Amino acid sequence: MRHREVRVAVILTVIAVVFTIGCQKKITPHPNQLNAFDGQAYDSLVSAQAALDEAKGQYASGKLPPSSKAIINDAGAVYESARTGWVYWRDVSMGIKPGDVNEAQAKLQDDLAQLAAAIAKVAAIKGGQR
């Protein structure tokens, strides 16, 4: 039963992230934000970092089982990949680095979906604790 709960959490989180990235709502922009996608990607990264920091703290204090270390570390690696992709996308978008903006954005969207799935796994090991 636990596997099914994790799978449902992952699916719902991925759907939420894709929906959030795809929506062009009127949101107060961040300073230096390039566009709505940039702001949404930034928000996703900040939220993921907060979830990882919380999980690391719980692990360090013994509130999570030893098996959770691999899940947290995997999510950290996915976070770093997404953060690197976001920086690259911004650099390409601003003309600082060469590259195709659309390809960089598509890659970043994929990275953010993978990040959402990884954070859902972290949330599952925490048992939905906040």
Image (cartoon, helix red, strand yellow):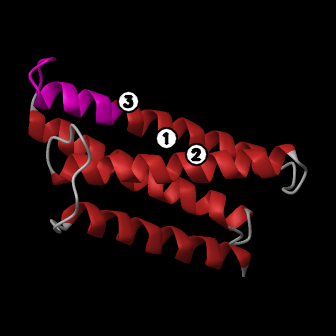
Residue projecting furthest to the top = 97
Amino acid residing under circle 2: Ala
Give whichever of discs 3 and 2 has the lower sequence position: 2
Camera-nearest residue between 111 and 34? 34
Assess whether mark 3 and mark 1 are in contact (beta carbons under 8 angstroms).
Answer: no
Distance from Cα at disc 1 to Cα at disc 3: 8 Å
Secondary structure at badge 2 equals helix
Distance from Cα at disc 1 to Cα at disc 2: 6 Å
Residue range of the region highlighted in magenta in the rendering: 85-99
Residue ID at (26%, 41%): 107
Q: Is residue 122 above or below residue 38?
A: below
Overall secondary structure of the magenta section: helix
For label 1, count other residues whose C-alpha is less than 10 Å away and answer few (under 14), some (14-19) or many (20+). Answer: many
For label 3, count other residues whose C-alpha is less than 10 Å away and answer few (under 14), some (14-19) or many (20+). Answer: some
Q: Quadrant of the C terminus?
A: bottom right
Residue ID at (55%, 73%): 9
Amino acid residing under circle 1: Tyr
Q: Is residue 44 above or below residue 20?
A: above
Assess whether mark 2 and mark 1 are in contact (beta carbons under 8 angstroms).
Answer: yes
Report the residue marked by disc 2. 75
- Residue 67: x percent and y percent? 82, 50
Distance from Cα at disc 3 to Cα at disc 2: 14 Å
Report the residue marked by disc 1. 79
Amino acid residing under circle 3: Thr
- Residue 125: x percent and y percent? 73, 62
Report the residue marked by disc 3. 84
Q: Quadrant of the N terminus?
A: bottom right
Secondary structure at badge 1 equals helix
Residue ID at (29%, 54%): 40
